[in-house]
Image: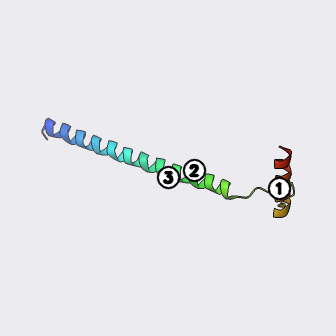
Amino acid sequence: MNEYLALELIRQRGSERREEARQAGLARTLRLARRRRATDAALLARPIPDYVDGTFAPADDLVQAAKRVNAAG
């Protein structure tokens, strides 16, 4: 095989491999970002309990407490 032909084939394969690696890196970055976004959204979507035992305060109690805080401030 001609040495120049061999060098050209090696150069082309190298550039193809670099392009594949770049695309794989982009896909990996996209997957990680999507996974992080899903985790962050799941954390924000969960309600936080009002009491230590994991229960929630009735809505009326929360409204009254907010009024007291606003009146005091």
**Residue 26 at least partly seen:** yes
Q: Position of residue 39 (x, y in %)?
A: 62, 53
For the point 35% across and 47% down, which residue is it? 20
Q: Earlier in the sequence, mark 2 or mark 3?
A: 3
User: Which amino acid lies under the numbered mark 2 shown in the image of this protein?
Assistant: Arg
Tell me if 34 is positioned left or right of 1 in this view.
right
Give the position of the N terminus as an image quadrant: top left
Mark number for residue 50? 1
**Separation (CA) of disc 2 from disc 3:** 9 Å
**Separation (CA) of disc 2 from disc 1:** 27 Å
Q: Position of residue 30 (x, y in %)?
A: 47, 50
Q: Which residue is mark 3?
A: 31
Q: Residue furthest front?
A: 71
**Are circles 1 and 3 on residues that touch, CB within 8 Å?**
no
Query: Which quadrant would residue 41 be assigned to in this image?
Result: bottom right
Tell me if 21 is positioned left or right of 38 in this view.
left
Mark number for residue 36? 2
Closer to the camera in the image, 56 or 1: 56
Element marked by disc 1: loop
For the point 84% across and 63% down, which residue is it? 60
**Residue 58 at least partly seen:** no
